[in-house]
Every structure is written in C-alpha cells, then in structure tokens.
C-alpha cells in the first residue's frame, strides 16, 4: 500500500477532525490537549515532560502494550485510552490539539503523518523517520499545513551544544575540514534471524506493533521492547539512535545540507540486523564554516572509535565515551556527549577558552552551564507546547529534522553496500548506484 493512500484513507475516517489546530485557535482556549502514542520507555519520559507544562491537558493515551498503557492511565485517569492510533484519531480528532509520537522508528511516519494530515502539531521522537522518502514527505506536509513540529532531540538546546555552535561559528579553529564522531553503543546484531515463533504475550498487540511493516512471527527479546533498534525493518542501528544526537551540533553549527558521498565500512548484510560495527564516511559540500568540502567520519559499536591521530588527546587522556571532534585549520574542538564543556586543542595542548566563552556568553546571552538533565531536558518539550500556543518557536522543526535524519539514513543505507562509495543526488532524491535506491522507501502493509 502506498504511504499516501494509508494516510488519506485513515484521515478520511474522521470528517470533523480535519480542522487545522492553529496556534491562534489553541491560544484562545489557553490549554493544549495532547494525545500520546507510545507511552512506555522514552514515551513515558515524553509524557511526563510534556505534561509538566502548566497548559497541557493529557487527553488521550495510546499503546499496543496494555501494561505500559495501564501505567500511563494510572497517572492520567481522565485521558481516554487506545491500542490503535488510527482509532484514536478517528474518535478524538476534534478533541485533541497536538500529538506526541514516541513509538519505535518504523511507526514514526505513519502515525505522525496521519496526525499532520488532520492539522495537528506533532512532537516526534528521533530519528524522524525510518525511510528517506518518509522524512521528505513529513517535511513537505508540515510546510504545506504550516504546522508546529519538533523532533525529540531534547539536548539540542543544552548549554554546551549551543556554546560549541557559537565557538565554531566564531572561527576559533578556523574553517572545519573534518568531523569525527563516535559512540561505542551497540544497536547492531550480527547473528542470524531467529527461527520459529513464540506465543505473543497477552498484553501485546503484535499486529498493531508491526503496523505498516511486513508481517513477521513474534520472538521474545528480539523486538519489543527496545531491541527493535537492531533490526532492519524497525530501527536504524546505532547511527540512527545515537548518531542523531551526536551529529546534531556539528550539523547545525556548520550549516550542513545533505552529503554528496557516503561509505560504510562494515560487515556484509545478513538481511536481518544492522552491523554491530560501522565506520561511516560522508563528504558534504562546503559551507561558510568549512573547507571546500567537509569529511565526516562516524564510528560505532563496542570499542569505537578506532584509533586516529586526530582523536588523540593531550597527555594521552582518554576520549569521552561518546562525542565529536571538530578538526579545523587552526586547531581542534572536542565536544563530549553530553553536559560537558567543549575543549579547545591547539598544537597538541589544551588551550584556555575563558575569554572567548565570556565574550560569546555576553553577546549571545548564553547564561551559565546547568548540569541538571531534568530541568534542561524539559525545555525542548515546553518549547513545543509554547510554540503550539503561539508563544515560542521550535528549534528542531521537521524542516531541520528531516535533513538531519536524511543524512543519518543515507549512512544506514550505505551499510547495505559495505565499503562501497554511494553518490547521493539530493535534487532528485536518488543514488547514482541504482541498487541503493530500493532502500529509500517501503510499501506500507495493510493492518
Ligand atoms: N530522545 C532521546 O533521548 C531518546 C531516548 C530513547 C529513545 N528515544 C526514541 O524513542 C522512541 C521509542 O524508543 P524506546 O526506547 O522507548 O522503545 P520501547 O520499545 O522501549 O518503547 C516503545 C513504546 O511504544 C509502544 N508502541 C510500539 N508500537 C506502537 C504503536 N504502533 N502504537 C502505540 N504504541 C506503540 C510500545 O509498546 C512501547 O510502550 C524511538 O524512536 C527512540 O529512538 C529517544
């Protein structure tokens, strides 16, 4: 089934609901009635953070796992509960103002696009989508309907990331030639696809969990909860999971668009899981903050990153567990992930940046670093709520999130063609290597 048909069919179920929830209309009522799709795992954090805004009324909750739904319902007993988001939209379309999507990646676009088709602002977890074509479609629909949107990269506005962005743009290391970024997390799986089938637990609706993805027998511990990240049909591996957070600051700071070439050094495809180790090399067209072209190298999996002289720290200090290194004409800037100050390295030694930070801090009203994740993390959510109420604007709208996600997904696709350089043509959204184009989109299953 084509994506468009899936979304249109479902939106047509509700005739009254296709009224755009404009900031003006929302602002008049003074409150924001939210619907939450996926309320276990990160969805619970999203629910708490959104609900902590004084103007939010949690109005509908949806989860395919009855246990997770029951926990959330206990917290918000007045909210209506659903297992199927299509039914939620059909019945509650006129009674909700905004939608939060916190499901596994393969359900981000189907649920978000249905909500947007109905004119609802959407907060969607990262990565924005599972396929490149979906990311482009999400961006287009949000633009057409002029909707408030935000991707769930809540660390986007943290002090250290804002500071790093301003330092890079101030030219502290000159034009940037290379970025190296890493995470030793392992959201890959090198083993074979599991055999056989396990009974589906009574609390889980497996058909709804699969949603638009192909039918597959249920196996315990392989998919729900969380482990779906490792599987081609549902997640995006470590790059899609951590890469979105860690790429975000360099991507934003350097004003990058999508890359021209992508190569993933990894094992051969198994047809089931993502590789457990990936080294993905991108080249980007230059911008005003970079050399003529920018090289970007991503390392993931246990033991990452591979040793490289550009990642060597003064006094043989250990690298932060996850992070990014900007390599410029005049030095390097290390940005740990996360809630740690960036550090400047020149000629193999750390250089004090107090004067630069003080200057930037004053000019940009940066404030002081806050190391409390709970208070800082909420800001990204509250920004979305305030934007829905016409009082703020979002810092990670789908217009930005779709490009960042596309970049990530191109690296994920390159993992299907180990050690081969793929050439991306952004203008017509295709690879020069025809075989790779098969992975830009997927048919939706009727469920
Ligand atoms: N921004 C962050 O820091 C951060 C951190 C963790 C996860 N995430 C993102 O959050 C999303 C969820 O990840 P997770 O770790 O919570 O996964 P999870 O598997 O632990 O939880 C997903 C929840 O969604 C529910 N669900 C699954 N399919 C559904 C559907 N069709 N309709 C309604 N509910 C459905 C599940 O039952 C479960 O409650 C992912 O996109 C992930 O990338 C973001």
Image (cartoon, rainbow, N blue to C red):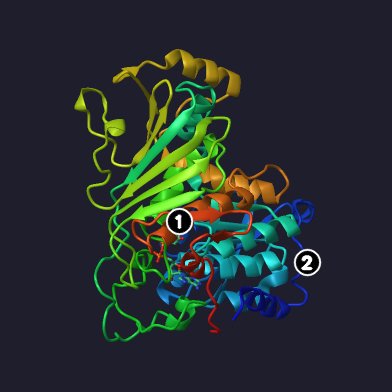
136 sits left or right of 230 in the view: right
Q: Which mark is residue 438?
A: none
**Residue 257 shows in the view:** yes
Q: Residue 168: where, in percent of width, then height? A: 49, 27
In the rendered image, the residue lying farthest to the left is 316
Residue at left offset 51%, top offset 48%: 259
Point 27% across, 79% down: residue: 194
Return the x and y of residue 158 as percentages of the image width and height: 48, 36
The image quadrant of residue 323 is top left
Q: Nearer the viewer, residue 194 or 327?
A: 327
The correct choice, above or below, for 370 with respect to 389 in the image is above
- From the image, tell me which residue sits under label 1: 422
User: Disc 2, disc 1: CB below 8 Å?
Assistant: no
Q: Residue at coordinates 30% horizontally, 86% vertically from top-left?
A: 197
Up/down of 222 relative to 22, above or below: below
Q: Which residue is mark 2?
A: 19
- Decide if residue 78 is in sight here: no
Observer-nearest residue: 411 or 336?
411
Q: Residues within 10 Å of mark 2 (few under 14, many from 20)?
A: some
Pointer 1: residues within 10 angstroms few (<14), some, or many (20+)? Answer: many
Which quadrant is the N terminus positioned in?
Answer: bottom right
Comparing 4 with 432, the one in front is 432
Q: State the image quarter where residue 109 is shown.
A: bottom right
Q: CA distance from mark 2 to mark 1?
A: 42 Å
């Amino acid at each position: 089934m084509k994506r468009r048909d899936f979304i249109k069919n479902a939106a047509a179920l509700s005739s009254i609901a296709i009224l755009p929830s404009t900031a003006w209309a929302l602002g008049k009522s003074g409150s924001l009635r939210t619907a939450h799709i996926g309320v276990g795992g990160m969805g619970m954090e999203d629910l708490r953070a959104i609900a902590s805004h004084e103007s939010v009324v949690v109005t509908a909750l949806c989860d395919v796992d009855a246990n997770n739904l029951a926990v959330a319902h206990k917290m918000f007993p007045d909210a209506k509960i659903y297992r199927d988001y299509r039914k939620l939209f059909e019945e509650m379309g006129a009674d909700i103002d905004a939608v939060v999507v916190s499901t596994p990646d393969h359900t981000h676009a189907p649920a978000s696009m249905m909500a947007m088709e109905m004119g609802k602002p959407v907060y969607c977890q990262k990565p924005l989508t599972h396929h490149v074509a979906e990311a482009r479609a999400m961006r287009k629909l949000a633009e057409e309907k002029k909707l408030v949107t935000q991707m769930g990269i809540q660390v986007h506005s943290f002090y250290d990331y804002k500071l790093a962005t301003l330092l890079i743009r101030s030219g502290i290391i000159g034009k940037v030639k290379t970025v190296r970024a890493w995470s030793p997390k392992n959201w890959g799986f090198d083993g074979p696809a599991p055999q056989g089938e396990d009974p589906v637990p009574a609390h889980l609706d497996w058909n709804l969990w699969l949603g638009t993805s192909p039918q597959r027998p249920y196996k315990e511990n392989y998919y729900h909860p969380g482990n779906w990240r490792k599987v081609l049909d549902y997640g995006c591996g470590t790059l899609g999971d951590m890469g979105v957070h860690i790429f975000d600051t360099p991507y934003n700071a350097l004003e990058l668009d999508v890359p021209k070439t992508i190569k993933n050094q990894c094992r051969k495809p198994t047809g089931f899981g993502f590789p457990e180790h990936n080294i993905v090399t991108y080249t980007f067209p230059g911008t005003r903050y970079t050399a003529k072209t920018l090289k970007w190298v991503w390392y993931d999996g246990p033991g990452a990153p591979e040793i490289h002289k550009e990642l060597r720290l003064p006094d043989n200090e250990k690298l932060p567990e996850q992070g990014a290194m900007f390599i410029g004409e005049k030095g390097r800037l290390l940005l740990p992930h996360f809630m740690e100050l960036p550090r400047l390295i020149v000629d193999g030694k750390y250089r004090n940046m107090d004067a630069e930070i003080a200057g930037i801090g004053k000019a940009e009203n940066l404030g002081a670093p806050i190391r409390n994740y709970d208070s800082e993390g909420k800001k990204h959510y509250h920004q979305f709520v305030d934007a829905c109420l016409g009082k703020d604007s979002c810092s990670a709208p789908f217009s930005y999130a779709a490009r960042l996600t596309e970049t990530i997904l191109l690296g994920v696709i390159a993992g299907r063609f180990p050690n081969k350089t793929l050439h991306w043509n952004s203008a017509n959204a295709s690879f020069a290597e025809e075989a790779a184009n098969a992975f830009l989109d997927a048919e939706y299953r009727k469920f």
